[in-house]
């Protein structure tokens, strides 16, 4: 359910961009979603289909680009992608790590029809 405000924002951005570009239709949206975000693709799609009804964004394809989580180890300086759900550093075994990327949810681009 926490996806609803995100989808509302994405729709607002899409409609604003389409209006400024004098678009006839929003064709597709390219979304970037981090592995550590709690965003569920199907829920985003559900809200998108519901909220975009009757707008020039209705029927636009949502393209989900999942990006891996990347962590930094404070003990040895290693940067690594999360594998098999194990958060500890694969080099030194430390749990003193922080997320560098992988929790994002953003609209990367919008494809429109002029």
Image (tube, grey):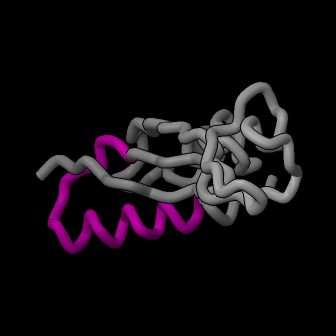
Answer left or right for 108 relative to 50: left
Residue at x 48%, y 38% (from the top left corner): 65
* Residue 88 percent coordinates (x, y): 84, 43
**Can I make out residue 10 in this image?**
yes
Q: Is residue 54 magenta?
A: no
Q: Provide the major secondary structure of the magenta segment.
A: helix
**Can I make out residue 3 in this image?**
no
Front one among 57 and 68? 68
Q: Which residues are magenta?
A: 7-29
Answer left or right for 67 relative to 77: left
* Residue 59 percent coordinates (x, y): 41, 38
Residue at x 49%, y 48% (from the top left corner): 32
Say above or below: 83 vs 32: above
Front one among 25 and 2? 2
Say above or below: 95 vs 82: below
Say above or below: 17 vs 44: below
Residue at x 48%, y 61% (from the top left corner): 11
Front one among 96 and 38? 96
Among the 4 quarters of the image, the one containing residue 9: bottom right
Answer left or right for 85 relative to 63: right
Residue at x 26%, y 63% (from the top left corner): 18
Front one among 39 and 19? 39
* Residue 112 percent coordinates (x, y): 22, 50
* Residue 74 percent coordinates (x, y): 75, 62
Say above or below: 14 vs 93: below
Answer left or right for 23 relative to 42: left
Residue extending furthest top? Answer: 84
């Amino acid at each position: 359910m926490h996806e609803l405000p995100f989808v509302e924002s994405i729709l607002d951005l899409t409609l604003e961009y389409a209006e400024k570009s004098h678009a006839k239709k929003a064709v597709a949206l390219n979304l970037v979603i981090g592995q550590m975000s709690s965003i569920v693709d199907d829920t985003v799609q559900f809200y998108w289909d519901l909220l975009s009804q009757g707008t020039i964004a209705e029927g636009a394809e949502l393209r989900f680009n999942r990006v891996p989580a990347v962590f930094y180890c404070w003990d040895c300086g290693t940067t690594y992608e999360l594998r098999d759900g194990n958060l500890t550093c694969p080099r030194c075994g430390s749990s003193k790590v922080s997320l560098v990327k992988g929790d994002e949810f953003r609209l990367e681009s919008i494809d429109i029809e002029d």
